[in-house]
Image (cartoon, helix red, strand yellow):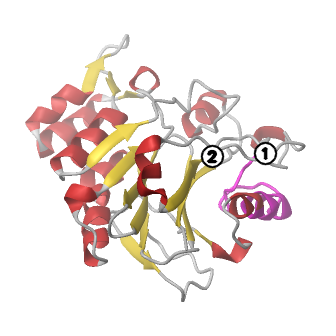
Amino acid sequence: MTDQSPAPLQTALLNEGDVALHGFFTRKGGVSAGIYSGLNVGLGSEDDRQNVAQNRARVAAWFGAAPEKLATVHQVHSPDVVTVDDAYDGDRPKADAMVTATPGVVIGILTADCGPILFLDPEARVAGATHAGWKGALTGVLESTVEAMERLGAKRENIRAVLGPSISVDNYEVGPEFVERFIAQDPTYERFFAPSRRAGHAMFDLPALTLARLADAGVTAEKTGHCTYSDEERFFSYRRTTHRKEPDYGRQISAIMLKE
């Protein structure tokens, strides 16, 4: 993978108005090796720090931006959102979403099974990037992102959102206590669980939950439909690594930048 350039997935929904560049990056186009092979951008991984820095620089370069213009956060599965502007200094505050109305700043979210969601209001020229695993989706990180975009001038009826590559229902088995947690919050959430081959377990549809909550928030949303667990050639996967008892895993990035 070291002789290739990054080739992220893109969607027509976020190209509306030609006001932003965006990409759901895969493993293609990086310099990392071994279990991190490809475009691992995870500062929290045990990968060689120079390789991670070079991979992040390649992502920034795809946007035509300097490496220091690539903003990410220290993700903690929270509903918290930070606003990024010209004053961005490379810090990584603990949060799970970013919003911006500043052109030229790339905001990116790292994932390895959780859902990366990119947002854009093409009329107000406001963008967002969100990391939503089950905990973030359940505790409101999607809604927090929309509200933060509104504070920058966006209107939710104009916001477009795309859920990128994440783990699919076919590969996300959970235990009974997990199901109970969701149904206790909202009994209708039972619809996001399907029977598993193992007694007492269920298959969880995180993408469906994500899209449902976005729709309930009044946002037009769609998904790319890629499964990180099943497509090892293109995506890192925390759960796949866990099942194999590997010592660590890489992270892919999904990012968006408002044009000047």
Say which residue appears at 20% left-offset and 56% top-offset.
157
Label 2 neighbour load within 10 Å: few <14, some 14-19, many 20+: many
Say left or right for 243 vs 122. Answer: right
Q: How many marks?
A: 2
Residue 29, disc: 1
Q: Amino acid at mark 1?
A: Gly
Residue 234, image x and y in percent? 67, 33
Say whether residue 51 is magenta: yes
Say which residue appears at 47% left-offset and 62% top-offset.
19
Instruction: State which region is magenta.
Output: 39-57
Which image quadrant: the C terminus?
bottom right
Q: Give how far apart the Cα atoms at labels 1 and 2 are.
A: 9 Å
Say which element carries label 2: loop
Q: Which of the pair 202/130 is nearer the observer? A: 130
Residue 25, disc: 2
Given contact means CB atoms under 8 Å apart, are the residues at marks 1 and 2 in contact?
Answer: yes
Residue 27, image x and y in percent? 71, 41
